Amino acid sequence: MATEIDMPSTRRVVLVLGRSVVTIALLVVVYFLAPLDPTQDTSTLILFLLGLAALVAMIVYQLRAIVTARYPGLRAVEAFASAIPLFLLLFAATYTAVSAARPDNFSEALTRIDALYFTVTVFATVGFGDITPLSQGARVLVTIQMVANLLVLGLLVNSILEAVRRGKSRRNSAPDPTAPPTGEEPS
């Protein structure tokens, strides 16, 4: 059972929430300021795949950080605050570039806001139908997002919760540095 000493302070919680908000804001700013190449070619696909690889690497780093964190639950909040927005913005940027290269890929040309809106509606499985993929390539990309959504929602959430559990278990099994020595000699 956690003691009051083991609980994070209100200041620490506010700091984590603040860092999470700043992380999300910075990711959104980068999305809106990043130059997106309007040519639909293999470089768009390569950049998209590199973005997915960077996302996976970041998630692996975050999972390890959660397990070793003093407050794994708070570290998990930061992991979600970076992983989910990065995932959504990666797809939104790709949709923006694909639409700019060929406006007939979607039912309407997508601005960055339109692409972000579309990405979130697909992620939330709402799919209002006001924006639809028309070309085979756009439909494949949206299908990839739908499958990735399931993976993110299932695997990411489960992995982060498991990392929190392991971090708390590791922390609870660690010796208390303030406890008096037991008097036993190490063998």
Image (cartoon, grey):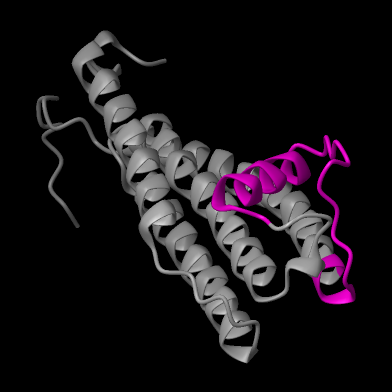
Q: Could you tell whether 63 is left or right of 121 in the image?
A: left
Magenta stretch: includes residue 2: no
- 35, 81: nearer the viewer: 35
Query: How many marks do you count on the picture?
Result: 0
Which is more toward the observer, 175 or 149? 149
Residue 24 left/right relative to 100: left
The answer to whether residue 74 is seen in the rendering is yes
- Image quarter in which the C terminus is found: bottom left
The N terminus sits in image quarter: top left
What residue appears at the point 59 percent right and 53 percent down from the top-left corner?
111
49, above or below 112, in the image: below
Seen at 27% across and 19% down, the residue is: 14
- Give the vertical position of 63 relative to 70 (above or below): below
Q: Is residue 21 above or below residue 137?
A: above
**On the image, which quarter does residue 157 sit in?**
top right
Q: Give the residues drawn in magenta, as a range.
A: 110-139
Residue 132 location, x and y as percent? 85, 53
Query: Measuring 44% from the left and 39% from the top, which residue is drawn there?
Result: 81
Percent position (x, y) of residue 72? 39, 36
Dividing the picture into quadrants, the one containing residue 4 is top left
Residue drawn at x 15%, y 40% is: 184
Image x and y of residue 70, in percent: 27, 36
Which residue sits furthest bottom?
42
Image quadrant assignment for residue 23: top left
Q: Residue 21: percent from the left, percent from the top? A: 35, 31
112 or 24, nearer to the observer: 112
Residue 170 in sight here: no
